[in-house]
């Protein structure tokens, strides 16, 4: 049955690359002072979205290696997005919770 087969393919892709959505967006959940999944592998051009699913806690996303200012805090129900246009390994942290909770993750971008 074609539908079932495509569902299996989607499930496999989801396991490889976080939560794959139809619009080439991969979702990373911020909850319990963790990023989940901690590591994702995405293709160049993929949009990554961090969704805050805490009850009250804010977070941000900072890529220390890129020399950028920390991203604004985002609160429950809010999200942040970034599109990766070059292959590479992109470690990131939640700046206010990196020390106390080791809240960090990695985005691997491949061709
Ligand atoms: Cu945080």
Image: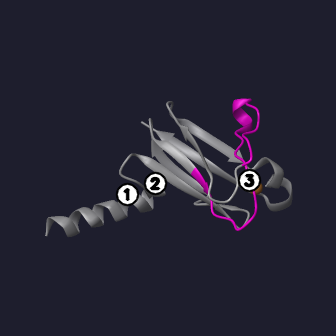
Q: Is residue 84 left or right of residue 76?
A: left
Do the residues under discs 2 and 1 have CB atoms within 8 angstroms? yes
User: Tag 3's secondary structure?
Assistant: loop
Name the image colouring: one colour
36 or 71, nearer to the observer:
71
User: Tag 2's secondary structure?
Assistant: loop
Q: Indicate which disc, 1 or 3, sits on the residue closer to the N terminus.
A: 1
Per the rendered image, the range of residues in magenta is 50-73
The residue at which mark 3 appears reads as: 59
The residue at which mark 2 appears reads as: 17
Q: Is residue 81 above or below residue 12?
A: above
Q: Main secondary structure of the magenta part?
A: loop
Instruction: Please name the residue shown 58% across and 54% down the image.
Output: 39
The residue at which mark 1 appears reads as: 13
Q: Is mark 3 within 8 Å of ligand 1?
A: yes
Which corner quadrant holds the N terminus? bottom left
Q: Is mark 1 within 8 Å of ligand 1?
A: no
On the rendering, which quadrant does ligand 1 occupy?
bottom right
Outermost residue to the left: 1
Q: Is mark 2 within 8 Å of ligand 1?
A: no
Mark 3 against mark 2, which lies toward the viewer? 3
Q: Residues within 10 Å of mark 3 (few under 14, many from 20)?
A: many
Instruction: Please name the residue shown 15% across and 64% down the image.
Output: 2
33 or 17, nearer to the observer:
33
Residue 14 pos. (x, y %): 41, 60
Q: Is residue 6 above or below residue 81?
A: below
Q: Indicate which disc, 3 or 2, sits on the residue closer to the N terminus.
A: 2
Q: Is residue 33 left or right of residue 89?
A: right
């Amino acid at each position: 049955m074609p539908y079932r087969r495509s569902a299996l393919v989607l499930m496999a892709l989801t396991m490889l690359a976080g939560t794959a959505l139809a619009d080439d967006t991969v979702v990373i959940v911020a909850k319990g002072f963790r990023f989940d999944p901690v590591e994702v592998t995405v293709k160049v051009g993929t949009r990554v979205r961090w969704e805050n699913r805490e009850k009250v806690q804010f977070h941000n996303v900072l890529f220390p290696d890129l020399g950028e200012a920390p991203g604004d805090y985002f609160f429950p129900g809010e999200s942040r997005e970034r599109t990766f246009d070059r292959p590479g390994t992109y470690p990131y942290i939640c700046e206010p919770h990196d020390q106390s909770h080791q809240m960090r993750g990695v985005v691997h971008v491949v061709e």
